[in-house]
Image (spheres, helix red, strand yellow):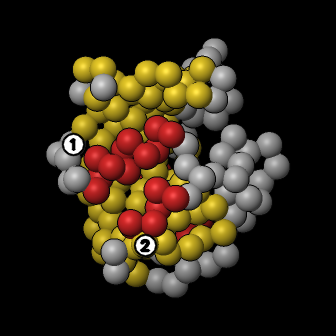
Amino acid sequence: MKSQLTTLCYIEKDEKYLMLHRISKENDENQGKWIGVGGHFEHQESPEDCLLREVKEETGLTLNNFFFRGIVTFDSDDNPAEYMHLYTSTDFSGSLIQCDEGVLEWVQKDKISSLNLWEGDRIFLDLLTKDVPFFSLKLIYKSGKLVKKILDGREI
């Protein structure tokens, strides 16, 4: 079973985020969704190790600097909780590669809300846009539907 510890990064350039349209993998829980880049921790990785490896593997880019923005806890039906470490970066180098998990595309930040996103992703993307300081967000899903949102210990 994969680690329930994950990273997700929104890489920014020219008022755009690098988004991954998840359309390539079979049996993908994110099939058809647009998300940032990241993935599951490997054995003995720190959050930063995982972040740097996943960004490089999925995009070909090297993060030169990044910011730890928050922890997002996903509680979904009978699955173990997932703890996602959320990052942003505007300082990177390298050239984009083809991603085997989907299609990478630079998307204007003000157009992202029109994409096929998870409902909970809209919440933490809004927090990032508002430059909210470090936060803890818990998202509770039942049968794929967001039923409860808790920000810094308070239901919203």
Mark on residue 108? Answer: 2
Q: Counting other residues with Cα less than 10 Å from the Cα at mark 1, is it few (<14), some (14-19), or many (20 or more)?
A: some
Tell me the quadrant of the picture where the C terminus can be found: top left
Which amino acid, mark 1?
A: Phe
- The answer to whether 6 is drawn above or below residue 61 in the figure is above
Residue 54 in view in this figure: no
- Specify whether 155 is left or right of 19: left
Is 94 left, or right, of 115 in this rendering? left
Label 2 and label 1: CA atoms lie apart by 23 Å
Q: Is residue 96 left or right of residue 28?
A: left
Q: Residue furthest bottom?
A: 95
Estimate the x, y position of residue 12 in percent, counting from the top left.
36, 70
Judging from the image, what secondary structure is the residue with disc 2 in?
strand
For disc 1, the marked residue is: 134
Element type where label 1 sits in the image = loop
The answer to whether residue 31 is above or below residue 81 is below
The spot of residue 149 in percent (x, y) is: 39, 26
Decide which of 46, 123 is in the foreground and name it: 123
Kindly indicate the quadrant of the structure image that contains residue 72: top left
Residue at 64% in and 35% down: 2
**How far from the left and from the top, in percent, is residue 23?**
74, 59
Residue at horizontal 71 percent and vertical 49 percent from the top: 31
- Residue 45 has which mark? none
**Can you tell which quarter of the image residue 135 is in?**
top left
